[in-house]
Amino acid sequence: MNIGSYSTTRKRGFEVNCAPPNAFGGMVEHHFLKFLRQLHTEFTPRQQLLASERKRILAESLEGKKPAYPLPSAMTRDKWRIDLPGWCGDQRNQMTGPADDAELVVKMLNSGAPGVMLDLEDSMVNEWSHQRTAVDNILRALEGELSYYDEKTKTQVSIKSPSPVIWIRPRGLHMSQQGVLENDELLSASLFDLARIAFYLDAANLKHPLSIYIPKSESAEEALWWRDVFQALANALNWPKDFIKCMALVESHPLAFQMEKFLFNLKDHIVGLNLGRWDYMASLIHFHLDDPKWVLPDRNTIPHDVPFFQNLRRLMVEICHKRGVLAIGGMTALYPSRRDEALNARALEVLARDKKNEADCLMDGAWTGHPDQNQIAIAQFPYPNQINARVRGANPCPNLRPEMKGVGQRTLSGTRTAVRTVIRYRNGVLNGKGASLIDGYMEDLATDRIYRLMIAQRVKHSCEAPIVNEALAPVPHTPELITQLFDEELEKLISERDETHLSSTDTLREARHISESMIVNEEVTPV
């Protein structure tokens, strides 16, 4: 992809997470490093090979060989089934949020949601101090000891009992960790996160098995990496072989064709799949950057039941229920507000429709990010799940690339919104926030990636797929236009800075340069 020959100042964006010198100085940490090195020797080379394979598959897609269903095999023909444990039978709502915010973690755990996902990935800043705080919070939450001081009530707020199922999302296989091993050797960030949590965990105090949410997978073969890591950790720590359980996000286009094989490869550990739809949308754009027919409309004009989502939902449900595991829906981005009554009513109405659609597709639950969403989400799904429900005669190979005709609008205003959002998101990152509330939507790395890809896509194909202004006249999306939009939106944000509580002018300018340079330099990998 070549979206232009112009240059911009290159500044820091997503850097590799690097531990500071002497981050592991104590005796316990010395034992941890010994534990980690043994795992690293086996699993980091495999992780790097898998990451290289991703690049090959993407390159093939951009040359016309799109992801496709595999040929039938024993994995799809045989009548194997996974026994769903009782402790996770009800996951009608899984609240999710960054693990570095102790107050948010406690509030999620006390929300009444049957599941809570503590995140080290998309809603987190990939920076050492944030990641270390997050793991500390996770360990204390698993032990039931995490609390925070409430300034309003002047009291210490603890986790209530009984607490929900706690899921942990480590960083994905595409990411590396630096500064931990000798010679500054890179290691798999996924492996590092899992090893830290498992090593320091008091498994005897857990209310349920250690439960992991696998992110960003792109093939069924990657499931074997996670399986082998889970079992290596269990072996090293004298746990039962299948002690670590997991769910996995389907948020890449290639994996959508391989879900059943993915389940098979993890059948001793996995209890469900989740449609991570915002990352899936980004992946769909990424794997079709060569195709002008797949220039997506403005993000917020794409309905929740658009065919490329709806067909995947139904396929996921059929596969999951056929094999005895949960099918979980995605996050509704529009956020409720306790200060804006109209926005709050709209957000909760959108939430109810969205989750009702997922329930009607026979999904078993979904994600939310705010305590006020919990009861509405839970109410849409039958208790405890719909695993025994299947559609008679379901299509085993539905079209996962249906035509986009008649869906949404492609507008200059939508491009401007994308530019403004990526600047504001990056500004949040530079201020230590991996997720930010922007114009009523909770935006994290998935949103940022969607918008960066949308802008790149529009520059590449605006002649074949026109983007129109308010007068419905086509507007060629040249690199110069994108630079102009970045300049204009930056100046607006600077002028609004006091009103919107944004940070310093210098940080906003840096956020603007990072955002545009990531698009120009084709940095669209979810890191």
Image (cartoon, rainbow, N blue to C red):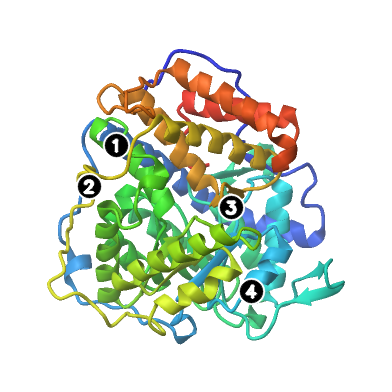
Q: CA distance from mark 3 to mark 2?
A: 28 Å
Please report whichever mark, 3 or 1, sits nearer to the chain's N-terminal start: 3
Mark 1: few/some/many CA within 10 Å (<14, 14-19, 20+) = many
Please report whichever mark, 1 or 4, sits nearer to the chain's N-terminal start: 4
Q: Given contact means CB atoms under 8 Å apart, are the residues at marks 1 and 2 in contact? A: yes
Q: CA distance from mark 1 to mark 2?
A: 10 Å
Q: Is residue 156 visible?
A: yes
**Vertical arrangement, residue 334 with respect to residue 482, above or below:** below
Q: Examine the image and state in which quarter residue 426 appears.
A: top right
Q: Position of residue 518 (x, y in %)?
A: 52, 29
Residue 401's mark?
2
Please report whichever mark, 3 or 4, sits nearer to the chain's N-terminal start: 4
Q: Secondary structure at mark 2?
A: loop
Q: Given contact means CB atoms under 8 Å apart, are the residues at marks 3 and 4 in contact? A: no
Which amino acid is tagged 4?
Answer: Leu
Q: CA distance from mark 3 to mark 1?
A: 26 Å
Q: Examine the image and state in which quarter residue 75 appears.
A: bottom left
Mark 2: few/some/many CA within 10 Å (<14, 14-19, 20+) = some
Q: Residue tagged by mark 1? A: 288
167 or 459, nearer to the observer:
459
Q: Is residue 200 visible?
A: no
Q: Position of residue 138 (x, y in %)?
A: 67, 66
Which amino acid is tagged 1?
Answer: His
Q: Secondary structure at mark 4?
A: helix
Q: Residue tagged by mark 4? A: 109
Q: Given contact means CB atoms under 8 Å apart, are the residues at marks 3 and 1 in contact? A: no
Q: CA distance from mark 3 to mark 4?
A: 17 Å
Q: Given contact means CB atoms under 8 Å apart, are the residues at marks 4 and 2 in contact? A: no
Left/right placement of residue 324 relative to residue 165 reads left
